[in-house]
Amino acid sequence: MTRIIFLGTGGGRFSTITQKRATGGIFIEDGKSIHVDPGPGALVHLCNKGLDPSRLDAVLVSHCHPDHYNDAEILVEAMTWGGTKKRGVLAGSVSVLEGLNGYSPAVSKYHQEKAGEVHALVPGDNISIRSMKVTATPAIHSDPTTIGFKIHTSSGVISYTSDTILDESVVEAHTGSRVLIMSVTRPLDSPIPGHLTSGDALDFVNVAKPELAIFTHFGMKFVDGVAEKEALLVERHTGVRTVPAVDGMEVFLGRKIDIKTFQ
């Protein structure tokens, strides 16, 4: 059984500043524990869920924006038992680990040296986290080194787009996934550069055809039932089960997929 926990479903500057939705990222558990894009509050939400950050096996960071990387260093400290044991995998975009074109490294060299393995990834790269394969996927965003992740679990492939526009290369990279987690920042009628709208998500899902599509990384325009309405629109037009994530939501992958929300 594989478990996905949404420790935050907000994204973008103003959702992050206001914390109308949390920004703790995504936790995946499948015999090993992975934290994806630990934005502000990731550590607190892990602990509030009763999850032990010292048991993390990997921290994955898609790009160098604080709503995705803010708590990465403290999670590396937890994963390495306060820096006393060189263990775990830290992987991210080139900007996150090396810096590029004004993007400073989001994780200090000091913290990078504490991890057991460090990988600056570009699309197509593969790494192994205790025998679990993770593939870096293309993304097109204002940080030119942004990547998504395709995580090969015992219950099937979980894809995470990170922030991107709709592009054939992005869709192709995530086709064949059982669960497709999309960063959908704006509704259909409110596009913003570098991010998916729910209209883009409809086209994405129509081609990729996952078993389950999940919206997350919501901006401020996804309030008052808008996320639910937009997800339902995608489901009706594609025939693919589509849900908007909520803070604390858990997804269980076995022979079937179960979802539990806590509101």
Image: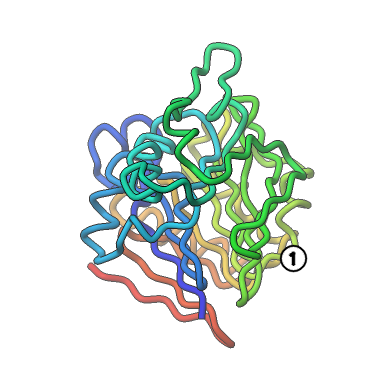
Q: Position of residue 158 (x, y in %)?
A: 60, 63
Query: Quick check: can you spot residue 75?
Result: yes
Q: Can you tell which quarter of the image residue 193 is in?
A: top right
Q: Observer-nearest residue: 57 or 150?
A: 57
Q: Observer-nearest residue: 26 or 215?
A: 26
Q: Position of residue 107 (x, y in %)?
A: 45, 30
Q: Position of residue 141 (x, y in %)?
A: 60, 30
List the single residue furthest toward the front: 84
Q: Give the residue pinned by disc 1.
A: 176
Type of residue at label 1? Answer: Gly
Q: What residue sits 43% from the left and 27% below the top?
A: 110
Coloring applied to the structure: rainbow
Q: Observer-nearest residue: 146 or 113?
A: 113
Q: Can you tell which quarter of the image residue 14 is in?
A: top left
Q: What residue sits 21% from the left and 60% below the top?
A: 48
Q: Observer-nearest residue: 107 or 138?
A: 107
